[in-house]
Image: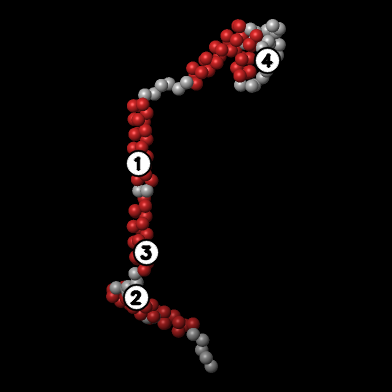
Amino acid sequence: MEGRHWNNDEIVAHYYGVAAPDGVHRWEECAECAALWHAFELRRQVIQLPPPVSRERLADIRAGLERRRDARTWARWWWAPATVATLCIAVVFNLMPHTQKPAEARAMEQILAEASQIEPAAVSATQFLFEEESK
């Protein structure tokens, strides 16, 4: 057996393929290095094992997720009926024939039209000053 023993950093690097250590012997050749390698694998397996979960707990989680999913389905479409109702109202108002203005509004328009045609007396007197005499 030639070379030195493996250390923890070299075992981790070798496992993940980061670097091949120089000057060490094969870990299978030495009982101490083999024990270090197996200890590393055992630690890794313990870390990777998920904690045990009972079937009842998994059933509770699944039921909770299904309740949340069912509740979210309605929450996702809550705006649809309001939008449809608003669009229907807008279409009805746009398709309705426009009615004539009320009598009061028509009367007010006529009064304003006549008032704008009436010329005040002061204006007619001043216009007389600016008229040119024709010869």
Relative vertical location of residue 18 with respect to residue 25 in this rendering, above or below: below
Percent from the top left, x then y, of residue 73? 37, 44
Q: Which residue is mark 4?
A: 21
Q: Which residue is mark 1?
A: 70
Task: Examine the rendering and report whether any part of residue 120 can be seen.
Answer: no
Q: Which residue is mark 3?
A: 91
Q: Are marks 1 and 4 in contact (CB under 8 Å)?
A: no
Q: CA distance from mark 2 to mark 3?
A: 30 Å
Q: CA distance from mark 1 to mark 3?
A: 33 Å
Percent from the top left, x then y, of residue 114? 35, 80
Q: Residues within 10 Å of mark 3 (few under 14, many from 20)?
A: few
Q: Residues within 10 Å of mark 2 (few under 14, many from 20)?
A: few
Q: Which residue is mark 2?
A: 109
Q: 37 or 7, which is in the foreground? A: 37
Which residue is painted at 34% across and 57% down in the image? 85
Counting residues from the N terminus, which is met first, the one under dot 1 or under dot 4?
4
Counting residues from the N terminus, which is met first, the one under dot 1 or under dot 2?
1
Task: Residue type at mark 2: give it.
Answer: Glu
Q: Residue furthest left?
A: 103
Counting residues from the N terminus, which is met first, the one under dot 1 or under dot 3?
1
Q: Secondary structure at mark 3?
A: helix
Task: Residue type at mark 4: give it.
Answer: Pro
Counting residues from the N terminus, which is met first, the one under dot 2 or under dot 4?
4
